[in-house]
Image (tube, grey):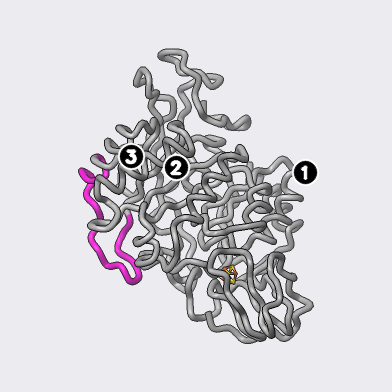
Amino acid sequence: MKRTIIENPIDLHRALWWAPAGDAIACELCPRACVIRNGERGFCSARINSDGVLYAESYGRITVSQLDSVEKKPLFHYMIGANLLSVGSYGCNLDCAFCQNHIIARSDEEVPYRELSPEQLVAEAVEKRVSGIAFTYNEPMIWAEYIICVSQYARKKGLKIILNTNGYIHGAARDDLIKAVDAMNIDIKGFSNDIYNELCDGTMRPVLETCEIANREGKHIELSYIMIPGKTDQPDMIGRFGGWVARMLGTETPVHLMRIHPDRMLQTSTVTTDALGAARMELMSSGLRFVYMGGTGNDFGRDTICPDCGRTWVERRAVTVEHQTVKGEKVSKHCPSYSDVKVLSRNGICPGCGRKTNIVENPVFENI
Ligand code: SF4
């Protein structure tokens, strides 16, 4: 991302997780391990070396903010129906060929932003009477210092911290950030290191480790598996993905199959609804209990159904939302929102068979 070199580093926030590397700096936040020379930014465009100090340049810089529902992240088993203040900044540490938010994630030009301190962001969330703050739109991992600071104020106000993330982070940064969040939707771009290399310029193992560590730490996790025709939709790949989820995260982990739309460098067709259905069956035969369909343009595959007796626990209907625009382009334009959500289970119990649900209920949700 081209941007004028900073004039006043005092205005910037000193980064965590880096070390000097000769006359440069080695950033230790993510597996890309950039070595950054004086005056330059890392691959993600969010961190800059100024005179031998690494700064988290995007700290507090907000390019997009919007009120939306927790279901839009998507999180279907967490704080159902909760309203969130969703915010994004700029930059990304992957380079996905199909990125729908490349205008902020991998832009070559400066993206307009406003600056909010952690206290100001939390005050805005409180004023808007939301249940939490979601860090989304661009990659939140590269915003880790800001998120950790926000979480300290947010917790005092009873607000949840939610990430919609690629999970591409490692080491102490990952441990510190995971402690600060309550729930995450983590993208799986395909269950193959080759896919990560070819389509995202990254590697898969660190992403899986992030899922496994967050799960061990007791954080709420849901996964979005990206369905790309001819790349990530083969039954054997989906079967291996399902086996890993069942083994490492548990069969109750919600998985969202996300049909991508042609965008940026990947002008492919989308997978068919039949292919999505076949992938869903493959995952369920791996033992997964909650597999949802995303990006279908309708409500099919969105309800939460009891895996034991088939009774509906939660009904969801997509609604059209006004998308934010940045430089004339809509942000997250393929993601539906859900304001019409009905919870039919009671107190975490299936009304049909008495099975305990795995849903984190929302104490302030009124549409029951
Ligand atoms: S966080 Fe950014 S600067 Fe640091 S290693 Fe990753 S891509 Fe490079």
Q: Which residue is mark 2?
A: 338
Q: Which residue is mark 1?
A: 156
**Dominant secondary-structure state across the stretch colored magenta:** loop
Vertical position of residue 227 compared to residue 23: above or below: above
**323 lies left or right of 176:** left
- Which class describes the residues within 10 Å of circle 2: few (<14), some (14-19), or many (20+)? many
Q: From where the camera sits, is residue 42 visible?
A: yes
Q: Which residue sits furthest top?
A: 353
Q: Is mark 3 within 8 Å of ligand 1?
A: no
Region of the chain picked out in magenta, as a range: 260-277
Q: Which residue is mark 3?
A: 299
Percent across and percent down for residue 216 are 59, 39
Of tags 3 and 1, the one toward the viewer is: 1
- As rendered, which of 67 and 314 lies closer to the eye? 314
Q: Secondary structure at mark 2?
A: strand
Identified at 62% across, 30% down, the residue is: 363
Picture quadrant of ligand 1: bottom right
